[in-house]
Amino acid sequence: MEKEIRSTQEWKAAIREGRLDETFEKLYGMDKCVIQAQRERYLDALDGFVATYGEKEDVHLFSAPGRSEISGNHTDHNHGLVLAAAINLDAVGVAAKNEEGIVRVLSRGREMDVVDLSELTVKKDEINHSPALVRGVAAGFVKFGFRVGGYDAYTVTNVLKGSGLSSSAAFEILLGQMMNGLYNDQAADAVMLARIGQYAENVYFGKASGILDQMSSAVGGFVWMDFEDPTAPVVRPMKFDLSACGYALCIIDTGGSHSDLSDAYSAIPYEMKSVAKLFGKEVLRRVDEREWKEKLPTLRGRVSDRAILRSLHFFAENKRVNEAADALEKEDLPRFFAQIIRSGNSSFRYLQNVYASAKPEEQGLSLALAMAEELLEGKGAWRVHGGGFAGTVQCFVPLAFCDEFSDRMEEVFGKGSCHRLRVRPVGGLQIG
């Protein structure tokens, strides 16, 4: 890809001539049909940019992936360990500088977000809306000592919303990459971009989330993370090619609704922390597991039984993360799959986030897990995906079995409910 490619017309010519194919192969895989689909997708994004802002002579392309949590279910909020992976679904942005000190972001199918960079204080009317993320990312760059400036952007995404694949984090990292590339010569590293994204989500968007999602999107590939100090997490990228080992990562959308589940989600960190408080600690990571075991008989009655079970999950899950990571490093797939299955069983039995106790009649995840176990036992792995209670199941499926597996799942959960993914080896980036 020539460095001189800058104008929208030059980008279109480069894409049509296949000069971005090597990059597309790295991000999305080698399949020729997939590469052609990405060519069309990027051309569509460029057309959207031109239709919105007109032809420009200094245009840049950016991408930021969604992510899948592999192991470490509900541990980050208590400063635990997590193994995650970037995926080949991503948010793509076309952007160019402007001299107005204003950021304009039009995401396909949505209204344009317009943020004046002279006003970077939190706006209450933007909470829970996308302009808050645009403003928050810009404010994060200022907060951490980087430059900001105006730009015009058009974005498209294929990260499934409500699927636990972190479409919001992909958008935040995409915004960060655009400001980083256009005004900072990529001076902010992946960890800093993740911190800026989390800052935007926590302070401006109003969602008190950890940094897991942003870090996974920013770093890429498989990544082991330790949140003992959430302001300075330890991050270790891992080189492992799941596809080369003959497996696909499949996410099954069971169609469950996340509405009215806020209390169920918030109860998990609250209950874990209620156990930690009995030991004079804020989070379970600060509690010595041996002391927890010794004092287990005295905990009942002081906190709920479910809180005790959830703390049990936390301690065991941290160990499983390390076991799973070690298995990946040694390319020991049977041991890796065993840890994934154990993680899922712990989430079901002890964490209890596969279905909401308030809605026991709605158990799409339970059904999907039962089907996956029947189909994959002895040749793959399965577990609840993400926050749980509704939504998606994660499965590791042999490539030769993917079509049959997908057909069986879609017979029950509907056409298009099984999404065959691959782990993307790189995180958010500026393509050019």
Image: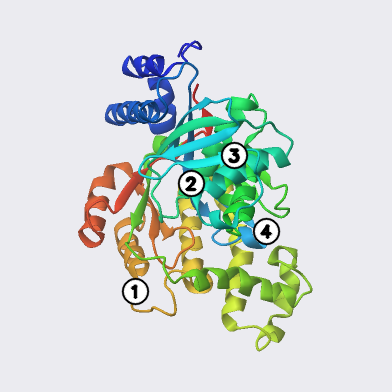
Q: Which residue is mark 4?
A: 79
Q: Which residue is mark 3?
A: 116
Residue at position x 46%, y 53% in the image: 337
Is 194 on the left or on the right of 67, as rendered? Answer: right
Q: Quadrant of the N terminus?
A: top left
| Separation (CA) of disc 4 from disc 2 | 19 Å
Q: Would you say the residues marked 4 and 2 are in contact, meaning their CB atoms lie under 8 Å apart?
A: no
Between residues 110 and 83, which one lies in front from this camera angle?
Answer: 110
| Separation (CA) of disc 3 from disc 4 | 35 Å
Residue at position x 50%, y 67% in the image: 347
| Separation (CA) of disc 1 from disc 4 | 31 Å
Three-letter amino acid code at the position of disc 4: His
Residue 67 is labelled as 2
Mark 3 / mark 1, whichever is N-terminal: 3
Residue at position x 73%, y 53% in the image: 229
Mark 3 / mark 4, whichever is N-terminal: 4
Q: Position of residue 238 (x, y in %)?
A: 57, 39
Q: Which residue is mark 1?
A: 362
Is 428 on the left or on the right of 149, as rendered? Answer: left
What is the crowding at mark 2: few (fewer than 14 residues within 10 Å), some, or many (at least 20)? many
Q: Is residue 230 above or below residue 185?
A: below
